[in-house]
Image: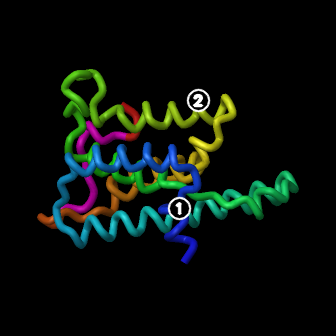
Amino acid sequence: WNLVTCSFFETNVFKLLIDLVGVCHLAVDLEYDSLESFGLYLGVCILACSTCTSFFCFVRFFMTSDDLMLVSPVYGFGGVYFSLLSYIRKAKSHTPVNVAYPAVTYQNLAFWVYLTQLMLRLVGLDMLSKDFYLSTVAILFSWTYLSFVYKDSEGNVGTKSDDFKFVN
């Protein structure tokens, strides 16, 4: 059960509020082809994020002998959030996130959020970036899933759009 629930667990109330505001903002613009395809996509992304993050912790433990990698829980909403960001990017890549800031589009929003998480981690604010590993896996896995596996309502598999390239 921890493979799924770690994505919805948060101990810091301030971080929880940030996550809720982010999800509410994304939920307004979220449009999906079919509930089944979207649910499968989100479920697979959550499992992939938690499984790959656990694998990373085990590998890091064996490489560094850092016992904290085995006993410190990795949790947070970053994996789900970045999976949602990738999904919205697929459909609305050049749409501004907020009309007041037209330069920030769904095409580059994931980059800015990830960069913010990285900076918070580098300055030692781990309480706001505890889910950094989940976010990293989510960016890679959700893009891969949407590019090569996701089946839309018309039966098309993956997306071949130039706007959805990993690097533009």
Q: Sequence order check: which comes first, mark 2 or mark 1? A: 1
Q: Dot 2 surroundings within 10 Å: few (below 14), some, or many (20 or more)? A: few
Residue 12 is a magenta residue? no
Residue 152's spot in the image, x, y percent? 19, 62
Determine whether label 2 and label 1 are within 8 Å by CB: no
Camera-nearest residue between 55 and 124: 124
Q: Which residue is rendered at x = 85% and y = 51% of the image?
A: 64
Residue 138 lies left or right of residue 164; in this view the side is right
The residue to which callout 1 is attached is: 9
Residue 3 falls in image quadrant: bottom right
Q: Which mark is residue 119?
A: 2
Query: Does 108 sit above or below residue 45?
Result: above
Per the image, label 2 sits on a secondary structure element best described as: helix
Camera-nearest residue between 138 and 153: 138
Residue 129 falls in image quadrant: top right
Residue type, numbered disc 2: Met
Residue 108 lies left or right of residue 123; in this view the side is left
